Image (cartoon, rainbow, N blue to C red):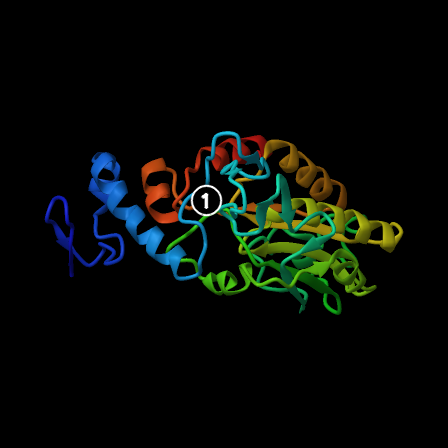
Amino acid sequence: MTKCRLCQATANSISKELGVCLRCIRERPAEALPAAMQAHKKSRAAFRLPQEPPKEPGGLLCKICVNECCLPEEQLGYCGLRRNERGKITGVSSEEGKLSWYHDPLPTNCVADWVCPAGTGVGYPEYAYSRGPEYGYKNLAVFFHACSFNCLFCQNWHFREETLKPKTTPIGKLVADADERTSCICYFGGDPSSQLPFALKASREALKARKGKILRICWETNGSMHQSLLDEMIELALNSGGCIKFDLKAWDENLHVALAGITNKRTIENFLRVG
């Protein structure tokens, strides 16, 4: 049992790390959120990541995601991927990314399996190789090593161990692994939002290399990307028979900030745009 440090209520449902209850987060955010943000600062310090999105007046602006970091000289953005070096943003790009991947035999445990061509055959023969599940084919599962949020209870938290490592991967190495038995690419992580220039270009190059063969482009994301990048994601998914899966952490903005450290306004706007 944990006691809320504000209202003194006691319950098993109160997180020890947050230290405040759901009711106080929703109804007393001015008091509850500063307490919750201490947990975020602690979790990010453990991985040497910026404690909040930098907003340096006159800094270099990155507009890839909702955080829109204004980077001071020699400082990292919130995602930990980009730095202001002598007035230029350096780090990952459309050519180099921080990621890993593996082949997952189809049908797989995708949350969209019940509507996806790989699990159902829907869209055959334009978007699926068979009238039912695509046995004998595989998904190229691409895991990005960074995120635009800081979810305290992330099931894939280990990506943070890779974010600040100097190693990057060239786009050609990923594209080469989309072989003839690969019928879909799914980007997740971490989250693809902070490395979308890379993912979008990789998708287009993979589709070009397959010369009209079925290759669905799918996304699992927190939905925090810039709207123009979202539009490119939508186009690739629709044209290839893929899908976009939004991970909606919470509807209430105060609760979302407490859990993920960042507002959900952009996520909801983008979710409505996709719909």
Task: Give the amino acid type for the residue marked by disc 1 in the picture.
Answer: Leu
- Which residue is at 25% across, 56% downward? 15
Residue indicated by mark 1 = 248
The quarter of the picture where the C terminus appears is top right
- SS state under label 1: loop
Instruction: Classify residue 159 as left or right of residue 41.
Output: right
Q: Is residue 34 above or below residue 95?
A: above
Residue sitting nearer the eye, 138 or 34: 34
Extreme-right residue of the structure: 211
- Which residue is at 72% across, 67% downward? 135
Extreme-left residue of the structure: 8
Instruction: Classify residue 160 as left or right of residue 44.
Output: right
Whether residue 125 can be seen here: no
Extreme-front residue of the structure: 86
Q: Is residue 228 above or below residue 140?
A: above
Rendered location of residue 206, percent (x, y): 80, 53
Q: Is residue 250 above or below residue 137?
A: above
Within 10 Å of the Cα at label 1, are there few (<14), some (14-19), or many (20+) other Cα atoms? some
Rendered location of residue 5, percent (x, y): 15, 49
Instruction: Classify residue 256 as left or right of residue 195.
Output: left
The quarter of the picture where the N terminus appears is bottom left
Q: Quadrant of residue 252?
A: top left
- Which residue is at 21% across, 52% downward? 19
